[in-house]
Image: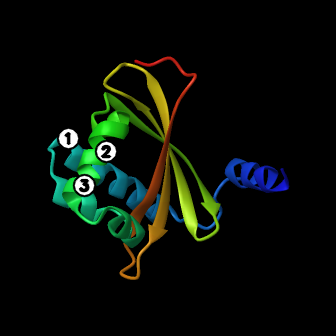
Amino acid sequence: MLRWVALLLCLAAPARAQTPADRQAIQGTIAGQIEAFRHDDAQTAFGFAAPAVHDKFGTAEIFMDIVRRAYQPVYRPRSVVYGSTTELGDHVLQRVEVVGPDGRAYQALYYMLRGTDGAWRIDACELTESLAVGA
């Protein structure tokens, strides 16, 4: 229980260390991957993923197959709105509100890591249906 409380406190606290350039780069990474999804460009989309994602899925084609089946709201969003960021250990959590192809609203939580090359990569994405009304 204490662990959940700590996680909720982390999620509620605004990010302090990210610069505007970091937030812009994080959002650019997410936007780039969504654009690659829209064009069914598996290689480019997979390129925005962190090394652990590469290790987990192995190939861009397997990754895209999972995204197509389980992440339709970010695979083919009607709209995308970036929310707040929060530091969470070595990750930055970027909240993104999306309206999926079904017209329903979702919250996507992107766990971002800065690579050794300085670029931000997507380490994970949690997707939940939102209580907000879709557009």
Where in the figure is residue 133, as x and y percent of width and height?
50, 17
Image quarter (top left, top right, bottom left or bottom right) of the C terminus: top left
Which residue, given by chain and number where applicable, does mark 2 sit on? 67
**Residue that appears at 63% across and 62% down:** 88
Q: Position of residue 91 (x, y in %)?
A: 56, 65
Q: Amino acid at mark 3?
A: Ile
- Dot in front, 3 or 2: 3
- Helix, strand or loop at label 1? It is helix
Q: Between marks 3 and 2, how big is the CA–CA gap? A: 9 Å
Give the foreground label among 3 and 1: 3
Q: CA distance from mark 2 to mark 1?
A: 11 Å
Name the residue beneath numbered marker 3. Answer: 62
In the visual, does 61 lie left or right of 107?
left
Q: Residue at x 71, y 47 (%)?
A: 12
Marks 3 and 1, how far apart at CA: 17 Å
Give the amino acid type for the residue marked by disc 1 in the picture.
Arg
- State whether residue 69 is above or below residue 92: above
Task: Name the side, left or right, on which 129 lies relative to 6.
Answer: left
In which quarter of the view is residue 25 placed?
bottom left
Drawn side of residue 2 relative to residue 101, left or right: right
* Residue receiving disc 1: 38
- Front in this rendered view, residue 45 or 30: 45
Pinpoint residue 48: horizontal percent, then vertical percent. Answer: 31, 62
Amino acid carrying mark 2 in the image: Val
Between 78 and 102, the residue placed more toward the observer is 102
Depth order, front residue of 128/59:
59
